[in-house]
Image (spheres, helix red, strand yellow):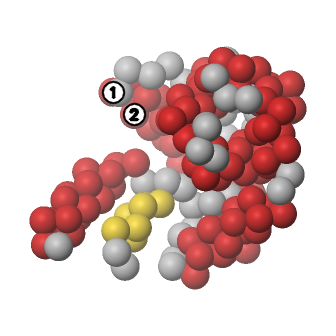
Amino acid sequence: MLVGGIFNRVNTGIYAAREDLNTPKNRYILKDVQDCARAIGLRMAFPPKVFPVNSVKAMRGCLWIAQDAKAQSRFLAFVEATFAAYFTRQEDISQDAVLTALCEQTGIDAAAFMAGIAQADIKSALKANTDEAIQRGAFGVPTFFIGEDMYFGNDRLPMAVAAARSAASAS
């Protein structure tokens, strides 16, 4: 899903809320992001130099990779490389040259990737995923759905995992 699409439709207040990063809540959020990153061994620049970033091409790329037989095995590597590019090295992941370099780094055919993200079905899939997330109640990221239950925030991941395990053992 595209978080900007969610913000534009159901959480427009987010833009005004992040204009002043020096409010008590925003200072806490910046600290919390660093605490969470440190807890799992990541180095994170937040907010990055390019903030917010237009992630449409990267998100379309994830959808294309997930359905392309030759690229599927590189999905997680691409996701991790994209996050590192943006949140660690502060690269502008909206730029074709950055995405091409990420493809080369992760063993994905960059020309096929660029052609794939321009396909109408990939564009439609991203919009449909975003629309579905909104219809199900999403207002930001990370949002996890386990069946009909929604979990928001990385601090809710343990509950989402527990719900998924419970659902899997019930079936």
- Give the number of the disc on residue 155: none
Which residue does the image show at 29% across and 59% down from the upper left?
Answer: 160
Which residue does the image show at 70% across and 62% down from the upper left?
Answer: 126
Q: Using residue 122 as the reference point, say whether residue 72 is left or right of it.
A: left
- Give the number of the disc on residue 36: 2
Contact flag, marks 2 and 1 (Cβ < 8 Å): yes
Which residue does the image show at 79% across and 47% down from the upper left?
Answer: 116
Q: Using residue 158 as the reference point, say whether residue 141 is left or right of it.
A: right
Q: Quadrant of the C terminus?
A: bottom left
How many neighbours does mark 1 have within 10 angstroms: few (below 14), some (14-19), or many (20 or more)? few
Q: CA distance from mark 2 to mark 1?
A: 5 Å
Q: Amino acid at mark 2?
A: Cys
Q: Is residue 22 visible?
A: no
Q: Position of residue 33 (x, y in %)?
A: 48, 36
Q: Amino acid at mark 1?
A: Ala
Q: Position of residue 145 (x, y in %)?
A: 40, 67
Q: Position of residue 35 (x, y in %)?
A: 40, 30
Q: Residue furthest front?
A: 69
Q: Is residue 111 visible?
A: yes
Q: Position of residue 96 (x, y in %)?
A: 86, 32
Task: Using the image, determine if residue 71 lies above or below residue 49.
Answer: below
- Give the number of the disc on residue 39: 1
